[in-house]
Image: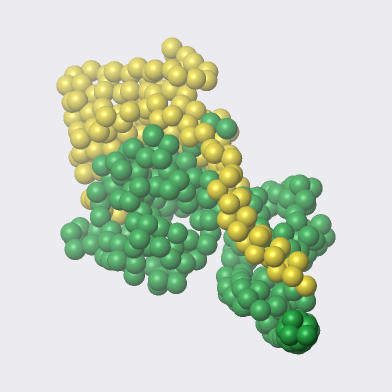
Amino acid sequence: MRFPIILFIATMLTGSCMQQQKEKPAIRPYVFNDSGLKVITTIINEKAGTVSMLYGNKAAMDYQINGFKAHQPNEMFQLVTFREQDNKFWFGSYINGELLHVETVKTQAAGQPTYNVQHYNGPTISAADPARRTDFILSLPPAFYPCEPHLSTDKL
Amino acid sequence: MKISNRIKIFSLFAGICTVGVVAMAFTTKVVDNPPVTGEVEAPVVVKNMLQRACYDCHSNKTDIKWFDKLPIAASIVRRDVVTARKHLNFTEWDKLSKGEQDSFLWEAYNMINAGNMPLPEYAALHSNAQVTKEELAAFRAYLETKRVKVTNTIDTVHTAAVTTTNYPIAPTGIQFSPEFRNWQVMSTTSRIDNTTMRVMYANPIAMKAIKEHKINPWPDGAIVVKVVWEKEVDSEGNMHPGKFLNVQYMVRNAKQYESTDGWGYAKFETPTLKPYGTLLTAQSCASCHKAANATGGIFDLPTSN
């Protein structure tokens, strides 16, 4: 009779210990430094298995979020692309994984915006792509954030 | 002679106690089993597993063993069953919407996969409650068939954003603040168990804790904010954040939020940032976040393994 009671108490105690002895996760290092840029939007490309976050400086935010109708000089956009991976802690969710590349577009007072890409992992974006990539990056509509002026529908 | 009397008295007392405990074990009513209104539907392997490993607490078919009726054990079992049924009842499945049913199945899988369910102390005493790798794989395969496809195209017309600075306060006392827009992004996720995508921000205290691997437990003052949108698909198949759904907060204060494992929860819904739920909702949040015990209750940390 005493055995189940002792076993019960023992399992209650060891149960809580077992919780703490689980495998420690290896958190992926944060390679990209946003340097104070803010998130404009997020784009998922399921075919490529990637997720990208578009960041912008104040001038870029003025265009994207604050409703400026035309691009101004010195806008800086950075599209940061990660490989998507399974979320270790929730089956049913994909999460950003390793950093693949960071593309930067800067507008100028005259002429075409500049474009460059820094590769970290994954395939290289070919040299013929800059104009197309610049257009793609500048055409991305901002995500709706509930706490700031927003005019995304003007740009769709 | 004296010693012999003492032994007799002790033996009699022990005997009475034993009879009492045995009587309790056979007569104590721990919980009722209300009528079954509708049972969960799943492939046979999955259903059998749910019945064997989950039904004792999460159904109206609770099978109470004799040792569950013993003193102390009975009150723990009663508490567990009442709490479990309130959260999820596989035999009142018809009372849930299709979306809720699927959502609970994904949650059940993740709780089992994380080793949080069946409760380790329950599984230790009920050997038939262990879930095998094969059963878990079958459960996963079943959920794969329930992936939600995004069909919304980019056409959301956003309503005006909040312009006030008098931001709403949730039942847990947490106030919305747009400050998170200046914080570092912790991660971004895309769900296949629903049609949402999210961006998570971590305040400087939380980000420092992540980088220094000091998240078990997280330091007081750490805040993680999650922004949730419906996914919308463009003509090239890219997914974008469409309809804004909510902003969720997790605020760390081990003492203040002791009853919810040290995290305060808040959710602000729709562009008007309407506070969602009650204090009880936070309990439900905490219950689910136990599946992320390995990372101190936070689900969405990118891992390299």
Question: Quick one: quadrant of the N terminus of chain B?
Answer: bottom right
Residue at point 52% right, 20% down?
A122
Q: Which chain is green?
A: B
Among all residues in the image, which is located at the extreme right?
Answer: B44
Of the pair A76 and A98, the residue shown nearer to us: A98
**Residue B99: x %, y % from top left:** 59, 63
Q: Looking at the rendering, which quadrant does residue A24 occupy?
A: top right
**Residue B285: x %, y % from top left:** 48, 62
**Residue A33: x %, y % from top left:** 33, 28
Residue at point 53% right, 56% down?
B290
Residue at point 20% right, 33% down?
A59
Q: How many marks?
A: 0
- Colouring used for the render: by chain
Q: Looking at the rendering, which quadrant does residue B260 occupy?
A: bottom left
Among all residues in the image, which is located at the extreme front?
Answer: B1
Q: In the rendered image, is residue B90 in sight?
A: no
Q: Is residue B238 above or below residue A33?
A: below
Q: Looking at the rendering, which quadrant does residue B35 occupy?
A: bottom right
Q: Is residue B290 left or right of residue B40?
A: left
Among all residues in the image, which is located at the extreme top?
Answer: A127
Question: Quick one: quadrant of the C terminus of chain B?
Answer: top right
**Residue B50: x %, y % from top left:** 74, 63
Of the pair A139 and A35, the residue shown nearer to us: A35
Q: Is residue B268 above or below residue A107?
A: below
Q: In the rendered image, is residue B125 in sight?
A: yes
Q: Which chain is yellow?
A: A
Q: Is residue A97 left or right of residue B100?
A: left
Q: Is residue A16 left or right of residue A73?
A: right
Residue at point 53% right, 46% down?
B294
Of the pair B250 and A104, the residue shown nearer to us: B250
